[in-house]
Image: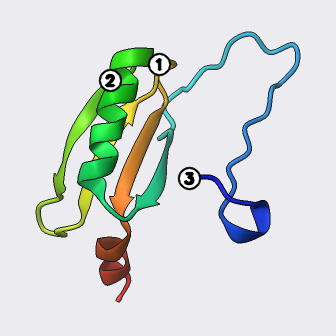
Amino acid sequence: GYKEEDDATVLELTYNYGVTEYFKGTAYAQIAIGTDDVYKSADVVNLVTQELGGENTLRPGPIPGLNTKVTSFLEPDGWKTALVDNEDFLKELE
């Protein structure tokens, strides 16, 4: 969901006037977003990618060795997003 800026993390995408093409180069270009339920979030991503395009790149489930549940996808322009289980990630930080 969406909340006011003072009540949530905000990701602001801006339009760079005059730029018509971006080169990703060899950089690691993805964003990770926390979610309370990776499996439900993956179901929503599946619906959206079917309607708007994109591609699921990692089925939801735990990463071997870490047991943190993750799923990831490419949006229609090819940018990667990973959805990470909030509770599992906090355990990694302990």
Q: Amino acid at mark 1?
A: Pro
Residue farthest toward the bottom in the current orientation of the protein: 94
Quarter of the C terminus within the rendering: bottom left
Q: Nearer the viewer, mark 3 or mark 2?
A: 3
Q: Amino acid at mark 3?
A: Gly
Residue under the image location 78 percent in, 69 percent down: 6
User: Residue 89 or 87: which is nearer the viewer?
Assistant: 87
Residue under the image location 24 percent in, 66 percent down: 68
Q: Helix, strand, or loop for circle 2?
A: strand
Q: Which residue is mark 1?
A: 76
Q: Amino acid at mark 2?
A: Glu
User: Residue 15 or 1: which is nearer the viewer?
Assistant: 1
Q: Helix, strand, or loop for circle 1?
A: loop
Residue farthest toward the left in the current orientation of the protein: 64
Q: Which residue is mark 3?
A: 1
Label 3 crowd bin: few (<14), some (14–19), many (20+), radius 10 Å: few
For marks 3 and 1, the one nearer the N-term is 3
Q: Which residue is mark 2?
A: 55
Determine if residue 53 is in view.
Answer: no
Q: Is residue 17 left or right of residue 45?
A: right
Q: Is residue 94 left or right of residue 19?
A: left
Q: Is residue 41 left or right of residue 21?
A: left
Which quadrant of the view contains residue 24? top right
State the CA–CA distance, disc 2 to disc 1.
Answer: 8 Å
Q: Is residue 6 above or below residue 82?
A: below
